[in-house]
Image (cartoon, grey):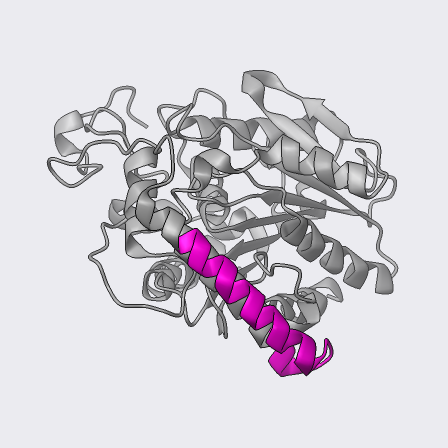
Protein backbone atom coordinates (compact mmCIF):
# COMPACT_ATOMS: atom_id res chain seq x y z
CA UNK A 1 0.00 0.00 0.00
CA UNK A 2 1.34 3.41 -0.91
CA UNK A 3 2.09 5.95 1.85
CA UNK A 4 0.92 8.96 -0.10
CA UNK A 5 -2.07 9.84 -2.25
CA UNK A 6 -1.69 10.79 -5.89
CA UNK A 7 -4.53 13.30 -6.07
CA UNK A 8 -4.24 13.59 -9.83
CA UNK A 9 -5.36 9.97 -10.22
CA UNK A 10 -8.31 10.12 -7.82
CA UNK A 11 -11.88 10.14 -9.14
CA UNK A 12 -13.60 13.50 -8.78
CA UNK A 13 -15.86 13.24 -5.71
CA UNK A 14 -18.61 15.56 -6.95
CA UNK A 15 -19.75 16.83 -10.35
CA UNK A 16 -17.78 19.91 -11.33
CA UNK A 17 -19.18 23.11 -9.87
CA UNK A 18 -21.21 21.39 -7.14
CA UNK A 19 -21.09 23.03 -3.73
CA UNK A 20 -21.56 21.12 -0.47
CA UNK A 21 -25.19 21.23 0.53
CA UNK A 22 -26.23 23.00 3.73
CA UNK A 23 -29.30 22.02 5.71
CA UNK A 24 -32.07 24.62 5.50
CA UNK A 25 -32.73 26.56 8.69
CA UNK A 26 -36.49 26.36 8.20
CA UNK A 27 -38.89 24.51 5.95
CA UNK A 28 -39.71 26.17 2.66
CA UNK A 29 -43.23 27.30 1.80
CA UNK A 30 -43.55 24.31 -0.54
CA UNK A 31 -42.47 21.92 2.21
CA UNK A 32 -44.91 23.50 4.67
CA UNK A 33 -47.66 23.10 2.13
CA UNK A 34 -46.59 19.47 1.76
CA UNK A 35 -46.95 19.03 5.51
CA UNK A 36 -50.48 20.44 5.41
CA UNK A 37 -51.50 18.26 2.48
CA UNK A 38 -49.97 15.23 4.17
CA UNK A 39 -51.95 15.93 7.34
CA UNK A 40 -55.18 16.15 5.33
CA UNK A 41 -54.25 12.92 3.53
CA UNK A 42 -53.50 11.33 6.89
CA UNK A 43 -56.96 12.10 8.25
CA UNK A 44 -58.74 10.71 5.18
CA UNK A 45 -56.64 7.56 4.85
CA UNK A 46 -56.80 6.79 8.57
CA UNK A 47 -60.57 6.99 8.30
CA UNK A 48 -60.48 4.47 5.44
CA UNK A 49 -58.07 2.28 7.40
CA UNK A 50 -60.43 2.29 10.38
CA UNK A 51 -63.27 1.10 8.16
CA UNK A 52 -61.07 -1.65 6.70
CA UNK A 53 -60.05 -2.96 10.10
CA UNK A 54 -56.56 -3.79 11.35
CA UNK A 55 -56.16 -7.37 10.18
CA UNK A 56 -56.45 -7.14 6.41
CA UNK A 57 -53.59 -6.98 3.96
CA UNK A 58 -55.23 -3.99 2.29
CA UNK A 59 -55.25 -2.18 5.62
CA UNK A 60 -51.53 -2.87 6.01
CA UNK A 61 -50.79 -1.51 2.54
CA UNK A 62 -52.79 1.64 3.27
CA UNK A 63 -50.84 2.16 6.49
CA UNK A 64 -47.49 1.84 4.72
CA UNK A 65 -48.38 3.97 1.73
CA UNK A 66 -49.72 6.68 4.01
CA UNK A 67 -46.43 6.84 5.88
CA UNK A 68 -44.35 6.79 2.68
CA UNK A 69 -46.30 9.62 1.08
CA UNK A 70 -46.01 11.76 4.21
CA UNK A 71 -42.26 11.18 4.34
CA UNK A 72 -41.86 11.96 0.65
CA UNK A 73 -43.93 15.14 0.90
CA UNK A 74 -41.73 16.41 3.70
CA UNK A 75 -38.48 15.55 1.86
CA UNK A 76 -36.19 13.16 3.69
CA UNK A 77 -33.19 15.45 3.52
CA UNK A 78 -34.98 18.66 4.44
CA UNK A 79 -36.22 17.06 7.65
CA UNK A 80 -32.70 16.04 8.76
CA UNK A 81 -32.09 18.98 11.16
CA UNK A 82 -35.36 18.23 12.95
CA UNK A 83 -34.80 14.52 13.52
CA UNK A 84 -33.38 13.12 16.79
CA UNK A 85 -29.93 11.54 16.71
CA UNK A 86 -29.17 7.91 17.48
CA UNK A 87 -28.69 8.39 21.22
CA UNK A 88 -31.89 10.42 21.55
CA UNK A 89 -33.85 7.74 19.72
CA UNK A 90 -32.23 5.04 21.83
CA UNK A 91 -32.96 6.81 25.13
CA UNK A 92 -36.58 7.33 24.08
CA UNK A 93 -36.84 3.62 23.27
CA UNK A 94 -35.36 2.67 26.65
CA UNK A 95 -37.78 4.96 28.47
CA UNK A 96 -40.74 3.55 26.58
CA UNK A 97 -39.72 -0.06 27.29
CA UNK A 98 -38.50 0.55 30.88
CA UNK A 99 -34.98 -0.50 29.94
CA UNK A 100 -31.92 0.92 31.65
CA UNK A 101 -29.74 2.48 28.90
CA UNK A 102 -26.44 0.69 28.29
CA UNK A 103 -24.10 3.03 26.41
CA UNK A 104 -20.42 2.28 25.98
CA UNK A 105 -18.43 5.39 25.08
CA UNK A 106 -15.35 4.73 22.98
CA UNK A 107 -12.71 6.89 21.36
CA UNK A 108 -13.45 9.50 18.71
CA UNK A 109 -16.98 10.04 20.04
CA UNK A 110 -17.92 6.49 19.05
CA UNK A 111 -20.77 4.96 21.06
CA UNK A 112 -22.13 1.44 21.39
CA UNK A 113 -25.83 1.42 22.29
CA UNK A 114 -26.92 -1.95 23.70
CA UNK A 115 -30.52 -2.87 22.91
CA UNK A 116 -30.75 -6.39 24.34
CA UNK A 117 -28.59 -9.21 25.68
CA UNK A 118 -25.21 -9.06 27.39
CA UNK A 119 -22.20 -6.99 26.39
CA UNK A 120 -19.95 -10.06 26.52
CA UNK A 121 -20.67 -13.54 25.16
CA UNK A 122 -21.72 -16.13 27.73
CA UNK A 123 -21.36 -19.17 25.47
CA UNK A 124 -19.54 -19.93 22.19
CA UNK A 125 -22.94 -20.40 20.50
CA UNK A 126 -24.11 -16.86 21.34
CA UNK A 127 -24.55 -14.39 18.49
CA UNK A 128 -24.18 -10.60 18.40
CA UNK A 129 -26.16 -8.31 16.08
CA UNK A 130 -24.20 -5.16 15.23
CA UNK A 131 -26.34 -2.60 13.40
CA UNK A 132 -25.08 0.35 11.33
CA UNK A 133 -28.01 2.70 10.77
CA UNK A 134 -28.77 4.48 7.52
CA UNK A 135 -29.88 7.99 6.71
CA UNK A 136 -27.45 9.18 4.03
CA UNK A 137 -24.86 9.72 6.80
CA UNK A 138 -26.92 12.79 7.70
CA UNK A 139 -29.83 11.39 9.75
CA UNK A 140 -29.86 9.72 13.16
CA UNK A 141 -30.77 6.07 13.56
CA UNK A 142 -31.63 3.40 16.12
CA UNK A 143 -35.31 3.93 15.32
CA UNK A 144 -38.05 1.71 16.69
CA UNK A 145 -38.42 0.09 13.26
CA UNK A 146 -34.73 -0.82 13.09
CA UNK A 147 -34.82 -2.14 16.64
CA UNK A 148 -37.99 -4.09 15.81
CA UNK A 149 -36.33 -5.74 12.81
CA UNK A 150 -33.22 -6.70 14.78
CA UNK A 151 -35.32 -8.01 17.67
CA UNK A 152 -37.45 -10.09 15.29
CA UNK A 153 -34.30 -11.80 13.96
CA UNK A 154 -33.20 -12.37 17.57
CA UNK A 155 -36.55 -14.08 18.20
CA UNK A 156 -35.87 -16.39 15.24
CA UNK A 157 -32.52 -17.33 16.78
CA UNK A 158 -34.17 -18.02 20.14
CA UNK A 159 -36.43 -20.57 18.47
CA UNK A 160 -33.28 -22.52 17.67
CA UNK A 161 -31.95 -22.20 21.21
CA UNK A 162 -29.43 -19.46 20.40
CA UNK A 163 -29.04 -16.47 22.73
CA UNK A 164 -28.25 -13.12 21.14
CA UNK A 165 -27.20 -9.59 21.97
CA UNK A 166 -27.94 -6.48 19.93
CA UNK A 167 -25.96 -3.24 19.67
CA UNK A 168 -26.13 -0.10 17.52
CA UNK A 169 -23.18 2.00 16.46
CA UNK A 170 -23.62 5.73 16.90
CA UNK A 171 -21.32 7.41 14.42
CA UNK A 172 -20.89 11.14 13.79
CA UNK A 173 -23.07 12.52 11.03
CA UNK A 174 -21.41 13.92 7.92
CA UNK A 175 -22.80 17.42 8.46
CA UNK A 176 -20.58 17.61 11.57
CA UNK A 177 -17.70 15.26 10.74
CA UNK A 178 -16.96 14.55 7.07
CA UNK A 179 -15.91 11.26 5.52
CA UNK A 180 -14.08 9.09 6.53
CA UNK A 181 -14.85 9.68 10.25
CA UNK A 182 -17.72 7.16 10.05
CA UNK A 183 -15.42 4.43 8.71
CA UNK A 184 -12.95 5.12 11.51
CA UNK A 185 -15.72 4.78 14.09
CA UNK A 186 -16.96 1.51 12.57
CA UNK A 187 -13.45 0.09 12.90
CA UNK A 188 -13.31 1.29 16.51
CA UNK A 189 -16.49 -0.53 17.55
CA UNK A 190 -15.57 -3.76 15.75
CA UNK A 191 -12.13 -3.79 17.37
CA UNK A 192 -13.74 -3.10 20.75
CA UNK A 193 -16.21 -5.95 20.39
CA UNK A 194 -13.63 -8.50 19.25
CA UNK A 195 -10.55 -7.41 21.20
CA UNK A 196 -12.06 -6.09 24.44
CA UNK A 197 -15.49 -7.64 24.82
CA UNK A 198 -14.43 -11.09 23.68
CA UNK A 199 -16.81 -11.62 20.75
CA UNK A 200 -15.41 -13.88 18.07
CA UNK A 201 -16.00 -12.64 14.51
CA UNK A 202 -17.81 -15.95 13.91
CA UNK A 203 -20.38 -14.82 16.46
CA UNK A 204 -21.06 -11.45 14.84
CA UNK A 205 -23.98 -10.69 12.51
CA UNK A 206 -23.37 -7.32 10.84
CA UNK A 207 -26.47 -5.50 9.58
CA UNK A 208 -27.00 -2.09 8.04
CA UNK A 209 -29.50 -0.26 5.89
CA UNK A 210 -28.89 2.29 3.14
CA UNK A 211 -25.85 4.37 4.20
CA UNK A 212 -25.34 1.89 7.03
CA UNK A 213 -25.03 -0.84 4.41
CA UNK A 214 -22.52 1.40 2.61
CA UNK A 215 -20.57 1.53 5.88
CA UNK A 216 -20.60 -2.29 6.02
CA UNK A 217 -18.84 -2.53 2.66
CA UNK A 218 -16.57 0.36 3.61
CA UNK A 219 -15.29 -1.41 6.72
CA UNK A 220 -14.92 -4.74 4.89
CA UNK A 221 -12.87 -3.02 2.18
CA UNK A 222 -10.75 -1.35 4.86
CA UNK A 223 -9.95 -4.81 6.25
CA UNK A 224 -8.88 -5.93 2.77
CA UNK A 225 -7.11 -2.74 1.71
CA UNK A 226 -6.66 -0.20 4.53
CA UNK A 227 -7.87 3.32 3.81
CA UNK A 228 -5.00 5.83 3.98
CA UNK A 229 -7.19 8.30 5.87
CA UNK A 230 -7.99 5.87 8.70
CA UNK A 231 -4.95 5.11 10.87
CA UNK A 232 -6.61 2.26 12.77
CA UNK A 233 -6.40 -1.22 11.27
CA UNK A 234 -9.15 -3.82 11.36
CA UNK A 235 -7.83 -7.33 11.72
CA UNK A 236 -10.38 -10.11 11.93
CA UNK A 237 -8.99 -13.38 13.27
CA UNK A 238 -11.70 -15.31 11.42
CA UNK A 239 -14.67 -14.52 9.16
CA UNK A 240 -17.76 -12.70 10.39
CA UNK A 241 -20.68 -15.11 10.68
CA UNK A 242 -23.20 -13.09 8.68
CA UNK A 243 -23.28 -9.79 6.81
CA UNK A 244 -26.66 -8.37 5.73
CA UNK A 245 -26.55 -5.10 3.74
CA UNK A 246 -30.13 -3.85 3.28
CA UNK A 247 -30.76 -1.54 0.30
CA UNK A 248 -27.06 -0.61 0.20
CA UNK A 249 -26.26 2.90 -1.07
CA UNK A 250 -23.04 1.96 -2.82
CA UNK A 251 -22.70 3.88 -6.08
CA UNK A 252 -22.80 7.55 -5.09
CA UNK A 253 -23.87 8.82 -8.49
CA UNK A 254 -25.56 12.08 -9.32
CA UNK A 255 -29.23 11.48 -10.13
CA UNK A 256 -31.21 13.37 -12.73
CA UNK A 257 -34.82 14.19 -11.76
CA UNK A 258 -37.11 11.28 -12.57
CA UNK A 259 -40.74 10.46 -11.98
CA UNK A 260 -40.85 7.69 -9.40
CA UNK A 261 -43.89 7.75 -7.17
CA UNK A 262 -43.13 4.34 -5.71
CA UNK A 263 -40.03 4.99 -3.63
CA UNK A 264 -39.79 7.02 -0.41
CA UNK A 265 -36.67 8.91 -1.47
CA UNK A 266 -36.34 11.28 -4.40
CA UNK A 267 -33.28 11.93 -6.63
CA UNK A 268 -32.79 15.40 -5.11
CA UNK A 269 -32.57 13.82 -1.65
CA UNK A 270 -29.86 11.44 -2.84
CA UNK A 271 -27.95 14.29 -4.50
CA UNK A 272 -28.08 16.35 -1.32
CA UNK A 273 -26.80 13.42 0.71
CA UNK A 274 -23.93 12.93 -1.76
CA UNK A 275 -22.97 16.60 -1.56
CA UNK A 276 -22.86 16.29 2.24
CA UNK A 277 -20.86 13.06 2.39
CA UNK A 278 -18.27 13.53 -0.34
CA UNK A 279 -15.63 16.28 -0.12
CA UNK A 280 -15.81 19.08 -2.70
CA UNK A 281 -12.26 18.45 -3.95
CA UNK A 282 -10.10 15.45 -4.77
CA UNK A 283 -7.77 15.61 -1.78
CA UNK A 284 -9.50 12.65 -0.16
CA UNK A 285 -9.71 9.19 -1.72
CA UNK A 286 -13.43 8.38 -1.63
CA UNK A 287 -13.20 4.87 -3.07
CA UNK A 288 -13.84 3.38 0.38
CA UNK A 289 -17.35 4.83 0.40
CA UNK A 290 -18.22 5.61 -3.24
CA UNK A 291 -17.63 2.28 -4.94
CA UNK A 292 -18.31 3.56 -8.46
CA UNK A 293 -14.57 3.68 -9.25
CA UNK A 294 -13.29 1.14 -6.75
CA UNK A 295 -11.15 -1.44 -8.61
CA UNK A 296 -12.95 -4.78 -8.68
CA UNK A 297 -9.84 -6.66 -7.59
CA UNK A 298 -9.86 -4.76 -4.29
CA UNK A 299 -12.73 -7.02 -3.22
CA UNK A 300 -10.71 -10.19 -3.67
CA UNK A 301 -10.37 -11.91 -0.32
CA UNK A 302 -13.88 -10.96 0.79
CA UNK A 303 -14.63 -14.63 1.37
CA UNK A 304 -12.05 -14.63 4.15
CA UNK A 305 -13.88 -11.83 5.96
CA UNK A 306 -17.44 -13.16 6.08
CA UNK A 307 -19.00 -16.58 5.93
CA UNK A 308 -22.49 -15.65 4.72
CA UNK A 309 -23.68 -12.47 2.97
CA UNK A 310 -27.15 -11.42 1.86
CA UNK A 311 -27.46 -8.29 -0.29
CA UNK A 312 -31.13 -7.32 -0.42
CA UNK A 313 -33.03 -4.45 -2.01
CA UNK A 314 -36.55 -3.38 -2.92
CA UNK A 315 -37.73 -3.72 -6.48
CA UNK A 316 -39.54 -0.36 -6.23
CA UNK A 317 -36.56 1.70 -5.07
CA UNK A 318 -34.64 4.00 -7.38
CA UNK A 319 -31.34 2.49 -6.18
CA UNK A 320 -32.27 -1.03 -7.26
CA UNK A 321 -30.31 -0.98 -10.54
CA UNK A 322 -27.23 0.36 -8.72
CA UNK A 323 -27.58 -2.36 -6.09
CA UNK A 324 -27.72 -5.06 -8.76
CA UNK A 325 -24.72 -3.62 -10.59
CA UNK A 326 -22.57 -3.49 -7.47
CA UNK A 327 -23.77 -6.87 -6.21
CA UNK A 328 -22.56 -8.43 -9.43
CA UNK A 329 -19.03 -7.24 -8.59
CA UNK A 330 -19.28 -8.96 -5.21
CA UNK A 331 -20.79 -12.11 -6.73
CA UNK A 332 -17.94 -12.24 -9.25
CA UNK A 333 -15.38 -12.52 -6.46
CA UNK A 334 -16.41 -16.16 -6.12
CA UNK A 335 -15.34 -16.74 -9.73
CA UNK A 336 -12.28 -14.50 -9.83
CA UNK A 337 -10.78 -15.10 -6.39
CA UNK A 338 -9.74 -18.65 -5.37
CA UNK A 339 -9.80 -17.63 -1.70
CA UNK A 340 -13.49 -16.77 -2.00
CA UNK A 341 -14.72 -19.95 -3.67
CA UNK A 342 -16.56 -21.03 -0.50
CA UNK A 343 -18.00 -17.56 0.09
CA UNK A 344 -21.79 -17.82 0.51
CA UNK A 345 -23.19 -14.64 -1.07
CA UNK A 346 -26.66 -14.01 -2.48
CA UNK A 347 -28.54 -11.09 -4.03
CA UNK A 348 -32.27 -10.94 -3.38
CA UNK A 349 -34.79 -8.46 -4.71
CA UNK A 350 -38.04 -8.31 -2.76
CA UNK A 351 -41.18 -6.27 -3.20
CA UNK A 352 -41.05 -2.86 -1.60
CA UNK A 353 -39.36 0.51 -1.38
CA UNK A 354 -35.95 1.57 -0.14
CA UNK A 355 -34.96 -0.21 3.10
CA UNK A 356 -38.55 -1.21 3.75
CA UNK A 357 -37.40 -4.02 6.03
CA UNK A 358 -36.18 -1.42 8.53
CA UNK A 359 -38.48 1.52 7.68
CA UNK A 360 -41.81 -0.13 8.34
CA UNK A 361 -43.60 2.67 10.22
CA UNK A 362 -45.01 0.24 12.73
CA UNK A 363 -46.15 -2.38 10.22
CA UNK A 364 -45.77 -5.95 11.50
CA UNK A 365 -42.50 -7.31 10.09
CA UNK A 366 -44.34 -10.46 9.00
CA UNK A 367 -46.24 -8.30 6.51
CA UNK A 368 -43.07 -6.92 4.91
CA UNK A 369 -41.72 -9.05 2.02
CA UNK A 370 -38.19 -7.65 2.39
CA UNK A 371 -37.99 -8.59 6.04
CA UNK A 372 -39.45 -12.06 5.46
CA UNK A 373 -36.86 -12.67 2.72
CA UNK A 374 -34.16 -11.75 5.25
CA UNK A 375 -35.72 -13.96 7.94
CA UNK A 376 -35.95 -16.97 5.61
CA UNK A 377 -32.35 -16.57 4.49
CA UNK A 378 -31.26 -16.01 8.11
CA UNK A 379 -32.97 -19.17 9.34
CA UNK A 380 -31.52 -21.31 6.57
CA UNK A 381 -27.97 -20.24 7.43
CA UNK A 382 -28.50 -20.29 11.18
CA UNK A 383 -29.24 -23.99 11.08
CA UNK A 384 -26.01 -24.78 9.21
Decide whether residue 154 is among the magenta residues.
no
Coordinates of residue 205 in the picture (x, y in percent): 66, 49
1 vs 42: above or below: above
Q: Quadrant of residue 277?
A: top left
Give residue 79's position: percent from left, percent from top.
Answer: 44, 42
**Which residue of the protein is positioned furthest toward the top in this rendering?**
107
Residue 310: quadrant of the picture: bottom right
Residue 341 relative to residue 281: left or right: right
Q: Main secondary structure of the magenta part?
A: helix
> Is 38 within the magenta?
yes
**Left or right of 134: which side holds 9?**
left
Closer-to-camera residue (132/229): 132
Q: Visible in this render: residue 247?
A: no
User: Magenta segment range?
Assistant: 34-60
Q: Residue at 48% of width from left, 27% of height from top?
A: 184
Image quarter of the C terminus = bottom right
Residue 234 is situated, as x and y percent measured from the top left of the image, at 53, 31
Amino acid sequence: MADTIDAANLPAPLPEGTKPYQHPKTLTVTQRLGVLLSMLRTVSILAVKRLLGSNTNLSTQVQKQLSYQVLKALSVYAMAPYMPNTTQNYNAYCKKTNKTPQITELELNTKALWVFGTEKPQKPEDKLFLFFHGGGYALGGATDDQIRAMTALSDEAKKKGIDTSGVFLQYDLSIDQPYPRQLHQAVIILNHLTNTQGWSPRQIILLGDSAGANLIFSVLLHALKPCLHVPLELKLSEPLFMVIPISPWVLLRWYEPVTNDLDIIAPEDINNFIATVLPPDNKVDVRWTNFTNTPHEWWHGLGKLCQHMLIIGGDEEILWNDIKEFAQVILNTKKEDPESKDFDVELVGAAGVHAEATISFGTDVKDIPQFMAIANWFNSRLSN
